[in-house]
Amino acid sequence: MKAATATRIEPQDCTNFKLRSLGRVVSRHYDGALTECGLKTSQYSLLSHVIKLGPLRPIDLARAMNVEASTLTRNLKPLLVAGYLTQCEGVDARSRLISITDVGRVKRVEAQRLWRSAQLDLNRILGADRVLALHQLVDDSLELLGADAMAAAAQES
């Protein structure tokens, strides 16, 4: 009599494609909610980071958000033009500091209300247990992949 051998099932689909597909759908969900205030989720995130971290250099903001400097520059432009953020001289003539304006704070509060509604809606659609499990899986995966690998991956995309 032969011993039963356990068969190991390996994922066949492309993990990158699946994650990017999920990311696009989730981004559309949040972006759709924020259209009422005229912001995209990336802009809301940028305003939130500047509020949390205070006036800071663009390079420090890019690091905190895990984005390339060119991506940050592209995302900053409409917020600077709209008057939600300002860019002024830093500690020396070569450095700049990004700060949020009073108008930017008001816009962020408006966007936060819409973001919160989108978050609750997503929790309702997926179920809180699934969302919590997803968060844990993402956090665990990021830890396993390591910060260096994630930083390199961000630069490639």
Image: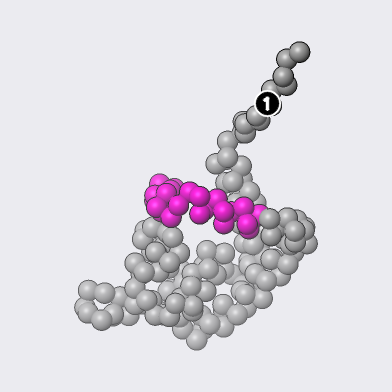
Of helix, strand and loop, which one carries label 1? loop
Please give the name of the residue rendered at 39% of the width and 49% of the height, measured from the top-left corner.
152
Q: Secondary structure of the magenta portion, mostly?
A: helix
Quadrant hosting residue 69? bottom left
Q: Is residue 131 above or below residue 103?
A: above
Q: Position of residue 122 (x, y in %)?
A: 72, 61
Asked if residue 135 lies in the magenta stretch, the reply is: yes
Residue 88 seen anywhere in this rendered image of the structure = yes
- What is the total number of numbered labels drawn onto the structure image? 1
Q: Position of residue 104 (x, y in %)?
A: 51, 80
Q: Going by the picture, which residue comes out furthest to the front?
A: 1
- Magenta range is 134-157
Kind of residue sitting beneath label 1: Thr
Q: Is residue 1 above or below residue 96?
A: above
Asked if residue 136 lies in the magenta stretch, the reply is: yes
Q: Going by the picture, which residue comes out furthest to the top?
A: 1
Q: Is residue 95 left or right of residue 119?
A: left
Which quadrant is the N terminus positioned in? Answer: top right
Q: Is residue 40 above or below residue 5?
A: below
Residue under label 1: 7
Please give the name of the residue rendered at 55% of the width and 50% of the height, measured from the top-left corner.
141
